[in-house]
Amino acid sequence: MKQQQFLDVIDRDEAERRWRSALDLAPRGAERVPLADAWGRVLAAPVRARFDVPSFDRSNMDGFAVIARDTYGATEEKPVRLHVNDECLPPGVEPRIEVRPGSATTIATGAMMPRGADAVVPVELTDVDGDEILVRGARVPGDALSYAGSDIARGETVLFAGTKLTSRETGVLAAVGEHEVSVVRRPRVGVLSTGDEIVAPHEPAGPGQVFDSNSRAIADAVRELGAEPHVLGIVPDDEQRLREAVRAALEDCDALLLSGGTSKGEGDVCHRVVDELEPGILAHGVALKPGKPLCLASSGGKPVAVLPGFPTSAIFTFHELIAPVLRAMAGLAERERAVRRARLALTTRSEPGRTEFLLVGLVQGAGGELTAFPMGKGSGSVTSFGRADGFVRIDRSTEMIEAGSPVEVTLIGRESEPADLVVIGSHCVGVDAIARRLGAEGFRVKLIAAGSRGGLAAARRGECDVAPIHLLDPATGTYNAAFLGDDLFLVSGYRRVQGVVTRRDESRSQEELLTDPTARMVNRQRGSGTRVLIDELLGGREPPGYSYDTRSHNAVAAAVASARADWGVAIETVARDAGLAFHALAEEHYDFAVRKDRRERPAVQALMKLLGEGSELRRELNEMGFRT
C-alpha cells in the first residue's frame, strides 16, 4: 500500500531507513573496458597476474653481474680480480654467456641477469684493468637485482574486486599485461529540473525566473561519485508532461533525481507524479535544515528523489542521503567524511526540531586551533556552498551555539591546501582586485567578510593574516590607527567614498528617504564599518528594512536596483557600476591591519608590495574609482 506522506516531516534516520528498504542497492552489472578508459572505475572481478613481474632476473644497477662468493673478502685496499666476459648486456637483450667462477659480465640497469650470476657489483665499486675488473667491495647473493616474480608472481591476486582504479592501480594493471579489465557498470542517473520559473543558463531570464544551477551541480556531483549523469533538461509545471518525462527517464536510467516542486502547494506536481510509481513515495518531508521538503521514492527498486529547489538545500540533501545510495550502486564502499575540530567564531541560533547544517569557512589561529566562521544559512545561497570548507551539524534539540563553543566540522569534498593569505574583515571590491593579483602570483587567498570589527577580533586571535578595516575614531577624527593595539600594524590602503544609493528615478530627497515611513532601506551586517556609519546617519531610528542585513556593498546595490529596497549605503564604485544615483556621505580610509608576527610571510610581503607607491595595483584601483 502506498504511503501518503506529503510533507509529513519525519526524522532523517527514519526517512533513510524507509527509502533504503525499497531500493536495490546491488552494484550494477559488469562490463569490460580498455585499460585506457579504466581510470576512476571500480573493478567488478579480481585481477590475477598471468605473468611473473619481473619475468626475468633483473639488474637494478649499472655494473657487473658476478657470483657473490667470488667477491667475499674484497676491500678497497685488497680488491678481487675478475675476468670480464666478452658480452655487454643492455636492457632487452638475452644473455649468451654464462657467468662462471672468476668471471663477470658488464650489465646495465634493467637488463636480464646472465645464467650463473647471483649479484651485481655497482660500477662505482670497480676499476677496469684491461680485460679484468678490480672489485673493491664484497657482495652477497641478491645484491642489486630483482628475481623473477619478486614483485608479482604468476597467479597472484594483483587487485581485488571493489577496488577503485587510480593511476597507481592502472599502472599495476599495465605492468601485468592487462589491456582490458572488468569493471562495474556506472549507474545511469537521470537529472531532471522542474518548474515554470526555471530557465537554462544560456537563455534570458525574465522577472521572477532563476537560472537552473541545480542540474549542473547535481550532475557533476553524480559524476564525482562514479555514476553517469544524464541531464534531461527542464520540464514546466505541467503534470502530464512531467509524467511522460519521468516514465521515459526510468526506462533508460537506474535512478532519477528531480529538483523543485517538492512542497504541497497547488503548483507543485512532482510529488503527485512520483507517487504514481510503485511503490512510490516512502518519505515526503525530512527534519533537516536546509532540506525539509525532500521527497524520497522508489520505482521497482530504482531510487527516485525530488530534491528541494533551493540550491543549498538540493546539494545538502544530495550529499546527505542520495550520495551513499549511488555509491553503493556504483560498487563503492561507504566513505567516511573527514572531520576537523574547531571553535565557532560567532553565536549561532538554530530552529529546534530539525537537524541543521551550518556552512562554515575554516581558519587557523596562532596556536594552530581552527575557528569556524559561518558562511550564511540561506537555502538559496549558491556561493556560500562554493566557498565553504565544511559544515557544522547542529542537533535537532539545540537552539543556540555560543561563540567560542567547540564544534565538529565535516569537510566538503577533499581537504584543500591551506591558504597562503587569510583575509577577514570589511568587504570591498578593491580587495577582490587585490586577491586576483595575488592569485596570479601563485598565492592562495581566503576571503571572509566579517566586518571591520570582526576582522580586527579575528586578527588579534591569530585567525587571519590581514584585516581590512575602515573605522573612524570620533575622539581624534582619524581612521583605523587607534583600533590596532600592540600586535598589529597598519598598511595604507586607499580612500573610498560612502554614500546613500538610490535608483535614478527616485524623486525623494535624501532627508525625505531617511524619514519617510514608506521608504524601505537595506542594511549592512552588525560589526561592519558601514553599519556604524548607517546607525550614526539614522540617529537611533529603525526604518522599514533596518533588519534586512546584507554582507557586501554589491548586495546593497542589487537590492536597491531591483526595487527590493529604496535606499542603502554603499561605496561610489559599486553604485556607479550598478547604474544607481549616489549621494556622498563621507570619504573614508580603507586600510589593512596586519599581524606583526606575519610580516615576513611571502604572501604578506607580496600584499605590501602590491600596495606600494606607484604599483600597477594602485593604478587599477584608481581606475575603479578609488583614491590612492
Image (tube, rainbow, N blue to C red):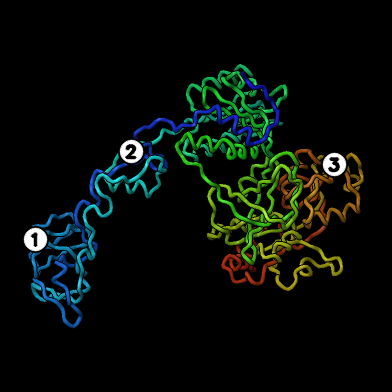
From the viewer's perspective, is residue 549 above or below residue 59?
above
Whether pointer 2 and pointer 3 mark residues with C-beta atoms closer than 8 Å, the reply is: no
**Badge number at residue 98:** 1
- The 10 Å Cα crowd at callout 2, few under 14, some 14 to 19, many 20 or more, is many
Amino acid at the residue labelled 3: Arg
From the viewer's perspective, is residue 113 above or below residue 273?
below
| Residue drawn at point x = 70 percent, y = 28 percent | 7
**Badge number at residue 181:** 2
Q: Nearer the viewer, mark 2 or mark 3?
A: 2
Question: Label 2 vs label 3: CA separation?
Answer: 65 Å
- The 10 Å Cα crowd at callout 1, few under 14, some 14 to 19, many 20 or more, is some
Image x and y of residue 99, in percent: 10, 63
Instruction: Say left or right for 463 vs 68.
Output: right
Amino acid at the residue labelled 1: Glu
Question: Label 1 vs label 2: CA separation?
Answer: 40 Å
Q: Is residue 263 visible?
A: yes
Asked where in the image residue 209 lies, by quadrant, the reply is top right
Question: Label 1 vs label 3: CA separation?
Answer: 97 Å
Asked where in the image residue 397 lies, by quadrant, the reply is top right
Q: Nearer the viewer, mark 1 or mark 3?
A: 1
- The 10 Å Cα crowd at callout 3, few under 14, some 14 to 19, many 20 or more, is many
Q: Is residue 557 visible?
A: no
> What is the residue that sits farthest to the bottom in this orientation?
77
Instruction: Say left or right for 513 vs 176.
Output: right
Q: Secondary structure at mark 2?
A: strand
Q: Total number of numbered labels?
A: 3
Instruction: Kindly identify which residue carries mark 3.
Output: 520
Whether pointer 1 and pointer 3 mark residues with C-beta atoms closer than 8 Å, the reply is: no
